[in-house]
Each structure stands twice: as C-alpha cells, then as structure tokens.
C-alpha cells in the first residue's frame, strides 16, 4: 500500500472497490451472457462472450451473441459443428482464427469430460492450457466463473487505472502494462473478483471514455489523480501508431457451369487463415496453394476494384471472374472446394472481404 499512497495520496484500495462495486450494482448492463451465467452457472456462455468481445465492439457482439447461442445452445452442439458453420454464425466480427481456437478449446474440454459432466477448468492456470485462451481471457473466466482473484487488463481497465494514478504513458506501452498489472493485482477485490473486473471494464466503457470522460458523474472522481490535475487527456497517452501497409490484392472468382467455387485458405495465409472464400493472392504471396496454377489467364474477366482494411493493412482489391479450366480437375485443393449456385454463395461467405468481392458479381451482368 505504500506504493499506492506514493502514487495517489490518501488512497485506499477498499474505497475504490466499494465505489466501483456500488456503481456497478446500479448501472451494470443486463447482457445475455450475464443473465445466462446467473441462471445456469455454465462457463460456456461466459467463454463465448469473452472470445466474441476480443477486438470487437460491444454493439457488434450483442446481436451476434444471441443468434450464436440460439444456434449452439450447449457445448455439445458447438463441438459437433464444423468450423465453417461456426464462422458463418459470426460473419462480420472479423479475426476468425479466434473462433477456430474456440472450437478446438471446446473440443478439448469435452474430450476431457467423463460422462455427462463437463470438466471445466478449475483454476486460472487450467484455463491458460486451453487453445485460444490467453492471460486476459483466463483472468476473466476464472474471476467470473470461479471467484479467483485474477485481475483483467483490457483497454478500458488500462485507461481507468492510468487516470486514477495519472500515469502518462502510451496505452500500448509494455512497461505501462507491467506497472498496471502490479497495481491491478494489489487492487483486485478478493471477495467478488468477477463483479469487480466487469465493473472496471464497464466503467471504462460508459464513464471513463477515451474522449470526453464523464468525470462529473464518475464514482472514482474523489480518488482520481488525473481528474484532480486536469490531465485526463494525457493519461494514458495515445497508442504508438504503426505505419499502415499498402497491399495489392487479386480475387479470382471461379465459375464452373452455373456454380461458383469457395475454397479453404491455407494455414499460412497472410489474412483469414483457414477461412473459406474466393481464390485470393497478394502481390508477393499467394493466399491459396493451387498447385502452382496461374489464374492470370486469357478470358479472365475484370469485375471491378474496391478498397478494404484489415488491421494495419490497406488493401486495393481487383476482382476477376475466371471460367473453370479442365486441367484444374487434377488439383487436390480445387477438388475439395465447395461449388454453389449463385443464390447460395452469400449464405456461405464469412469475411467482409469476400462479401465485397461477391457484391461485384451480383452487380455485373452475366
């Protein structure tokens, strides 16, 4: 506590805990995953929400979560589904590899379960052994479902703690995260860590916003150094922006008779690993392994160009329609493709990149 007092005079962690939890008890949102956990005490519902919320806005997740649970109401239903089926249910959320890992993680849990009893991880350390579960997710799951006092440190919590102690470092600074994790471990409410973690995150979402924080109604105003010093715009500082990378991309939409082909992207693809879609190549790297076939062929028809952004990459995408060539029948990967009628294609696409390309097909006369 000496270190905490040196950062914020007259600071008491018990006061922070009480203020945060009191605010949360009145203001917390009745999200579906919270209601389902409260009713069934099944970690399945919490786990899915934590994966969906990674690098995705709350507004985008809420409707997807509800439809996803309706489609896969139990772990058994999710494990029996294919990755393609799962990814179609989360179409538009992006970062699809997390859902591949979610599927593998659920399989691992179910395989380790005797009989009808699901052997959910019983500690933070056990959660960390599950595919796709990192330190943040393990802390969230263990604190909410096991009452284990493991602190979470997402963007919202980083902002709240940085302002409370007026720590003026970039929010993606590694040293800042070390400092804040030390503080977070000291501040965690051992009696109700799940509610405490969720309260800090929700406080960051609603009150301690990046721009124009609502300090006047913040329950932590009294103990916030940044508020006292009028430096909320400096704590934390803006992220160090990485230089955007411009890439040239070609999408080839294969057509055989009146059907269109979708193919699974390879494991080492730069984007959308293992996700079904159209044949895609970068200027310096093929997304698909097509046995060395060249799709820049006579008769290839240009459909149009669009711009697309994936993380820090800005893509200029040229789209072409390609008529099936007989000699491709020997290609192993193309044999494994899914050939669909035009009316079926949109229902099978996962990524917004492929959806934009397909829109050009529907807009251009055959």
Image (spheres, rainbow, N blue to C red):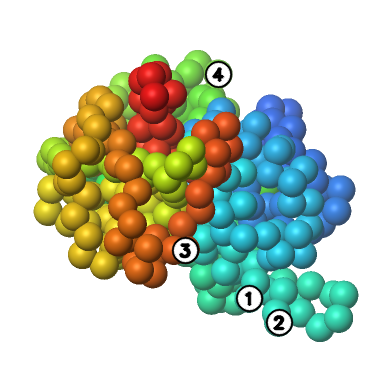
Q: Which residue is mark 2?
A: 112
- Residue located beneath label 3 in the image: 336
Earlier sequence position, callout 4 versus callout 3: 4
Inspect this view and state whether residue 274 appears: no
Identify the mark nearer the N-term, 4 or 1.
1
Q: Position of residue 38 (x, y in %)?
A: 82, 48
Q: Secondary structure at mark 4?
A: helix
Expressed as whole percent of the image width and height from the top left, the position of residue 298 reads 17, 41
Give whichever of 163, 319 is nearer the camera: 319
Position of residue 124 measured from the top left corner of the image (x, y, whole percent): 58, 70
Tag nearer the camera, 3 or 2: 3
Q: Earlier in the sequence, mark 3 or mark 2?
A: 2
Does the residue at mark 4 contact the one at mark 3 (Cβ under 8 Å)?
no
N-terminal of the pair, mark 4 or mark 2, is 2
Residues under labels 3 and 1: Cα distance? 27 Å
Q: Nearer the viewer, residue 90 or 364?
A: 364
Q: Residues within 10 Å of mark 3 (few under 14, many from 20)?
A: few
Residue 205 seen in this snapshot: yes
């Amino acid at each position: 506590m000496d270190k905490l007092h040196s950062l914020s005079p007259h600071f008491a962690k018990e006061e922070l805990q009480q203020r945060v939890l009191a605010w949360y008890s009145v203001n917390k949102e009745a999200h579906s995953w919270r209601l389902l956990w409260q009713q069934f005490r099944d970690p399945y519902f919490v786990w899915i929400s934590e994966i969906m919320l990674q690098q995705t806005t709350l507004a985008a997740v809420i409707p997807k979560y509800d439809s996803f649970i309706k489609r896969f109401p139990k772990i058994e239903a999710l494990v029996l589904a294919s990755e393609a089926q799962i990814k179609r249910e989360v179409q538009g959320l992006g970062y699809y590899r997390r859902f591949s890992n979610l599927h593998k993680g659920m399989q691992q849990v179910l395989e380790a379960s005797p009989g009808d009893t699901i052997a959910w991880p019983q500690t933070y350390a056990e959660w960390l052994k599950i595919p796709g579960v990192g330190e943040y997710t393990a802390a969230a799951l263990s604190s909410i479902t096991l009452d284990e006092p493991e602190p979470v440190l997402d963007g919202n919590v980083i902002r709240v703690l940085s302002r409370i102690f007026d720590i003026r470092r970039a929010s993606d600074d590694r040293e800042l995260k070390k400092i804040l994790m030390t503080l977070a471990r000291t501040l965690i409410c051992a009696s109700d860590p799940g509610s405490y973690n969720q309260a800090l995150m929700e406080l960051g979402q609603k009150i301690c916003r990046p721009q124009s924080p609502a300090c006047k109604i913040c329950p932590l105003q009294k103990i916030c150094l940044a508020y006292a010093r009028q430096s909320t715009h400096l704590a934390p500082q803006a992220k160090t922006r990485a230089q955007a990378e411009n890439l040239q991309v070609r999408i080839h939409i294969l057509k055989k008779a009146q059907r269109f082909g979708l193919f699974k992207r390879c494991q080492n693809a730069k984007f959308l690993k293992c996700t079904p879609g159209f044949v895609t190549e970068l200027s310096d790297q093929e997304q698909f392994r097509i046995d060395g076939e060249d799709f820049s062929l006579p008769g290839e028809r240009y459909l149009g160009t669009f711009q697309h952004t994936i993380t820090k990459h800005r893509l200029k995408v040229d789209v072409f329609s390609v008529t099936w060539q007989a000699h491709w029948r020997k290609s192993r990967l193309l044999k494994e493709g899914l050939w669909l009628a035009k009316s079926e294609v949109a229902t099978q696409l996962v990524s917004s990149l492929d959806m934009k390309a397909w829109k050009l097909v529907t807009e251009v006369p055959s």
